[in-house]
Amino acid sequence: MDFYKIKGGKKLNGEVAVSGAKNAALPIIVASLLADGETVLSNVPNLMDIKTITRVIECLGAETDYDAEKNVLRIRVENLRCAEVPYDLVKTMRASVYVMGPMLARLGIADVSLPGGCAIGERPIDIHLAGFEALGAEIDIEHGNVVARARKMRGANFIMKKVSVGATVNLMMAAVLAEGETVLENCAMEPDVVDLGRFLVKMGAKINGFGTERIVIQGVKKLSPASYSIMPDRIEAGTYLLAGAITRGDVKVNRMEPDHIGALRETLGEMGFRIENGKDWTRIIPATKLTGAYIKTLPYPGFPTDLQAPLMSLLTTVPGISVISETIFENRFTHVGELRRMGASIDVEGNMAIIKGVKRLSSAPVMMSDLRAGAALVLAALAAKGTTEIRRIYHSDRGYEKLTEKLLGLGADIERVKGGTF
Ligand code: UD1
């Protein structure tokens, strides 16, 4: 297995361009199943999770052709069929359950291995399933699979008991072809939901209110395939700003939407960093005096849980006390033990992490436990004294396109070493 070797202490400087958003691309790729014909998606990042979701839709009869150089994915749907989406795909990527919405909408049946718990928490899909039931489906758990069947999907009013990105996108896809009107309440307002909404509208769906708490869908009889360009990845953009911050460098992040990372920009500003923005870029400029931060992860537009671990790495290097309260996932502090190995001072009490800034992190052999925890370790290594080896980097391969190249472009001393012992 490959690993990263990072020599810390170099200030990152320069410009970096953000790739297409993984979390927007996943539901949009799946939504292509809603229409027969050819869908052409551009700005699709070349990532493991994208490969996994294309395998998932191929199981269901789609044909795909990905041009990794141009980031263009062509999807042809002609003979959509109900087939089991197997455990080996679902266990590597939970977003595989997104196919339930389109499958119910088009064929009235979906059969997907039920995802179990994962590294960051229990992550049930009960809200997705309750929503399908409200739209007329019957749900059974059979031999580890969740099987949903519906004679006819009918519009309904459904209030999500908790804000869920996955349930919101899955139910939008289930409802676009249902008979009559569907009103979804307490919806996730993440930009990824909005990107899916725009794509569905381009396919001919009648949807209003995506990007707000209340989404109203008038079912239509048929959708048509569409061409669409995936929005930029706000979590990747935030990660590079944090890479600039932790090395006290001057980094301009291009091809992004500054509005999508408002909560991060605000936090960095309050800490003392100077932030400049243009239409599609944000720049972080080093500060002379920094203070700690208190942040709470929340659904959008609050501080994103996906930037909690990378922000924590920064906070370990900032004088004074910082507090992070994680309210989205119950077990999202797996990076803490690894950061402590690098000299960080962090106490965890329930869902709170109390961080006392240290003068300098120091290198240590560490392991990624999930995608964003992995990003946190890369950032910590960029700032640490000495050379850090990071293992299990297949986690960051899931969500960061050309990570090594982009960091090298900013002047980092990073090497991806082929092969390794574990
Ligand atoms: C998505 C993102 C992930 C991000 C998360 C929160 C994708 C592919 N992944 O994950 O990167 O960290 O949003 O912004 O877009 N919940 C339930 N029942 C459900 C569904 C969710 O209890 O049926 C809970 C979850 O356990 C969690 C919370 O709701 O505590 C939010 O989860 P959700 O927004 O659904 O996250 P994902 O869509 O899985």
Image (spheres, rainbow, N blue to C red):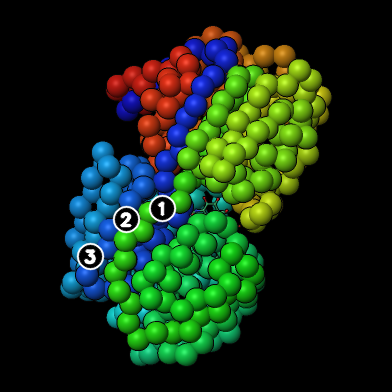
The residue wearing badge 2 is: 41
Which one is earlier in the sequence, the residue at label 2 or at label 1? 2
Q: Which residue is mark 1?
A: 230
Q: Residue at x 42, y 30 (%)?
A: 403
* Picture quadrant where residue 202 is located: bottom left
Q: Residue furthest front?
A: 279
What number is the disc on residue 126? none
Image quadrant holding the C terminus, namely top left
* Residue at (39% x, 61% y) in the render: 28
Q: Amino acid at mark 3?
A: Glu
Residues at marks 2 and 1 touching, judged by CB atoms closer than 8 Å = yes
Q: Position of residue 344 (x, y in %)?
A: 67, 22
- Dot 2 alpha-carbon crowd within 10 angstroms: few under 14, some 14 to 19, many 20 or more: many
- Helix, strand or loop for disc 3: strand
Which badge, 1 or 3, is on the more N-terminal residue? Answer: 3
Q: Examine the image and state in which quarter residue 401 appears.
A: top left
Residue under numbered circle 3: 38
Could you tell me the amino acid type at mark 1? Ile
Q: Quadrant of the N terminus?
A: top left
Q: Position of residue 288 (x, y in %)?
A: 76, 17
